[in-house]
Image (cartoon, rainbow, N blue to C red):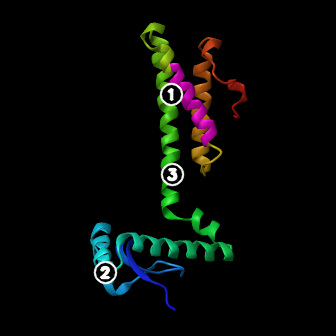
Amino acid sequence: MQGRIAFTAGLWGDAAVVCRAVEGQPGPVVDPQFGVFDTWTHANDFAANLNHGLDVDPLEARQIVTSAILARAHLLQATGCLDIVCTDAPVLIVANALQVRLLLTHLALALTFCRLARTLETECGGDRLLRNARSALLLAVTSMFRLQIEDDEFEEIQARLELLKLALREFSPQHALVRLDSVSS
C-alpha cells in the first residue's frame, strides 16, 4: 500500500518551490511540475491548496512531511552522510559566520565599556560597564569552542581578547569575575 501524500513549500537554492512528501519515504522532494514561485509564502499557499484538494488537513500534511523528513534523516544516518550534510548546510555556514561577527562585535563593545568605565565615577554606572565587559570576555572564551573560526578571525579574536584582558586588569581585583590568566592566549 502506498503512503499518504502531502505537499509543502521549500527552498531550492534561492527559489521557492513546492515539494511532495510521501509518508514514511525519504523526502520531501521538489516537484518540478509546479515550477518556481516568487516567494516561499506563495509556494506554501499553493501547497496548502493542493493538500486541500487531496482532503489532507494541515495537521495531517505536517505529519506526512515530518515523517518524510525523518525517513530522510534515518537514511542519511544509516549511510554515514548525516554529519557531512549537516555541517555543510549553507544556512549553518552563514549562521556560524554571523555568530563569529557577533562575537567580534561583543569584544569591541566590551573594550568601549572599559574605556567608558575609566572615565566614569563608580556611582555613574562604571561597575555595570565592567560587568558587561566581563560578560563579553566569558562569552568569547566559551564561544570559541563551539564555533568554526577561520585563522584570520581567530587571530582577530585573540587580539581583542588580549586588549580586553589588559583593559580589565587596570581595574581593582574586585572587578575580576574570572582569573584572566586562565583565558588561553
Q: What amino acid is at disc 3? A: Ala
Q: Name the residue located 57 percent from the left edge and 21 percent from the top edge.
A: 167
Q: Position of residue 5 (x, y in %)?
A: 42, 83
Instruction: Give the Cα distance between marks 1 and 2.
Output: 53 Å
The answer to whether any part of residue 13 appears in the image is no
Rendered image: mark on residue 110: 1
> Dot 3 corresponds to which residue?
97
The mark that comes first in sequence, 2 or 3, is: 2
Q: Name the residue located 38 percent from the left edge and 78 percent from the top edge.
A: 7
- In this rendering, position of residue 173 left or right of residue 4: right
Q: Secondary structure at mark 1?
A: helix
The answer to whether any part of residue 40 appears in the image is yes
The mark that comes first in sequence, 1 or 2, is: 2
Magenta segment boundaries in residue numbering: 130-143
Q: Secondary structure at mark 3?
A: helix
Using the rendered view, name the quadrant where residue 142 is placed: top right
> Dot 2 corresponds to which residue?
50
